Amino acid sequence: MQVVLIGGFGVAASMLWNPVQAAEVEKIHFLIPGGAGGGWDGTARGTGEALTKSGLLKHASYENMSGGGGGKAIAHMIETAERQKGTLMVNSTPIVVRSITKVFPYSFRDLTPIAGIIADSAVFIVQADSKFQSWQDVVAAFKSDSKKVKVGGGSVPGDLDHIAVALAIQAAGENPKKVKYIAYDAGGKAMAGLLSGEIHVLSTGFGEALELSKSGQVRILAITSATRSKDAPNVPTVKELGYDMIFANWRGFFGAPGLSYNEAHVYASLLRDMYATPEWETVRARRGWTNQYVPGFQFYSFLEEQEKAIGGMLRQLGFLK
């Protein structure tokens, strides 16, 4: 079974909508719904870094607000909307997953979708000295005794990191419900769990693992992209190893509810202009992200499509009735 969670999210969509930079944005406060070291954290800080170093933005500030699977930050944006005109909240596929599964009562409709900006494939990583030398070794151990293979992730059970490994196990012909998944609050804590030996395998975003892999602290066994990444050409894809599965997570930004059409246009234009800067390419390459820009109404339509696709997938995997 081949699954792509990012269908239609890309360059073609961006060509349909060409906002004009209506006014200069001097500062942005980035609200991050999880802890330090995770994919949301890296996306917000990487975006702020590129914008400020390129001169497109004068000042960026950051606030990590964990809790409720991201629901605490969303509730904060909604409840204090009048004070959040200069705030952009980063989010990704979990805003759809956690709305569908009722982890929180909100959805993307309660915010102002600004633009999706990147795609990040999942990877399965182990400690540098792990007994698992390949993803096939993990699959073999799972087939032998699934209870002895502890897999961790920086999101709640039934969410993105869990879904990625469940799909990979299902593609190997095994029952995804048997995955022994240990949840951590954000990618940084999950990585610490792997390095301390609490878990054997970490399911995480490619961007969160790339630098540690280059430093030799972890080994990436496989990536869930359609083809090998140019940023880690020696890492095989799950698909090329014989398991028919592709998976990717989009990430983007949302404004407070009630943000005007023109204000949303200005932010989307700023993010669009960022792509042309060498500062953004430095950030992108460091994280191994794929550029995926889709603004405004196209972003909203994409999120509606995600609800349908993800809902069906969660039911198939047994995470949703």
Image (spheres, rainbow, N blue to C red):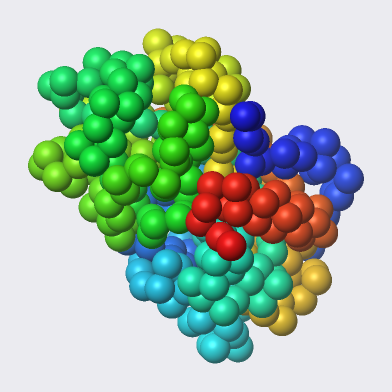
Residue 280 position (above or below residue 20): above
- Regarding residue 214, the answer to whether it shows in the image is no
Which residue does the image show at 63% across and 29% down from the upper left? 2
Observer-nearest residue: 10 or 71?
71
User: Which residue is outermost to the right?
Assistant: 16
Query: x, y (%) of residue 248?
Result: 56, 37
Residue 316 position (above or below residue 278): below
Residue 159 position (above or below residue 284): below
**Rendered-image quadrant of the C terminus:** bottom right
Which residue does the image show at 39% across and 57% down from the upper left? 157
Horizontal side of residue 227 vs 173, given as left or right: right
Query: x, y (%) of residue 76?
Result: 49, 82
**Rendered-image quadrant of the N terminus:** top right
Which residue does the image show at 86% across and 50% down from the upper left? 17
Q: In which quarter of the image is residue 3?
A: top right
Query: x, y (%) of residue 317?
Result: 54, 47
Q: Quadrant of residue 183?
A: bottom left
